[in-house]
């Protein structure tokens, strides 16, 4: 079965809670799953089945997840691709924390020693290559 991944404009996406984001990562990996299959993928501190079901229904209300009904049970699938979410998340972080400055973002990681000189050189090479 083909599952259409909706490419919603990033500006209309509602922010996810940490738990919702964790569930989306599982759904992106599995591509389609029943609640019990998502529950099996949660590594520790598993929520109650009904709690997880509520989280997934909230994701559906926010437009991130769709479902296929099989009688009284639902199989869920992502409507938003991981790439579209990542772009929205990064654009929001850039705006909220770095005043839309990529220089500020890279400077932050350099100051925190999260990016090496070699990494920076590779980034510069990629930029020059894509010009």
Image (cartoon, grey):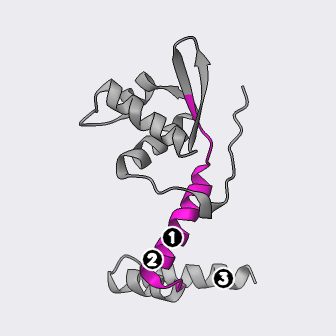
The image quarter containing residue 98 is bottom left
Q: Which quadrant does the N terminus fall into?
A: top right
Q: CA distance from mark 2 to mark 1?
A: 6 Å
Percent x, y for residue 76?
55, 30
> Which dot marks residue 127?
3
Q: Is residue 30 shown above or below 114?
A: above
Q: Evaluate if marks 3 and 1 touch, with contact meaning CB atoms under 8 Å apart.
A: no
Direction from residue 70 to residue 18 in the image, left or right? left
Residue at image position (61%, 64%) is: 11
Q: Which quadrant does the C terminus fall into?
A: bottom right
Residue, far right:
131
Q: Is residue 99 magenta?
A: yes
Residue interval drawn in magenta: 76-101
The image quarter containing residue 66 is top right
Q: Is residue 70 magenta?
A: no
Q: Which residue is mark 2?
A: 96
Residue at image position (33%, 80%) is: 113
Q: Earlier in the sequence, mark 3 or mark 1?
A: 1
Residue at image position (48%, 81%) is: 118
**Closer to the observer: label 3 or label 1?**
1
> Which dot marks residue 92?
1
Percent x, y for residue 78?
58, 40
Q: Evaluate if marks 2 and 3 touch, with contact meaning CB atoms under 8 Å apart.
A: no
Direction from residue 60 to residue 107 in the image, left or right? left
């Amino acid at each position: 079965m083909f599952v259409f991944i909706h490419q919603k404009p990033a500006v209309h996406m509602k922010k996810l809670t940490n738990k919702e984001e964790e569930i989306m990562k599982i759904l992106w990996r599995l591509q389609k799953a029943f609640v019990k299959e998502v529950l099996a993928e949660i590594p520790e501190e598993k929520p109650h089945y009904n709690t997880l079901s509520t989280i997934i229904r909230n994701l559906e209300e926010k437009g991130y997840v769709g479902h296929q009904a099989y009688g009284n049970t639902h199989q869920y699938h992502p409507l938003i691709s991981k790439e579209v979410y990542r772009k929205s998340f990064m654009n929001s972080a850039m705006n909220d924390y770095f005043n839309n400055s990529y220089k500020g973002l890279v400077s932050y990681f350099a100051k925190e020693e999260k990016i090496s000189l070699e990494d920076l050189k590779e980034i510069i090479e990629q930029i020059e290559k894509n010009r």
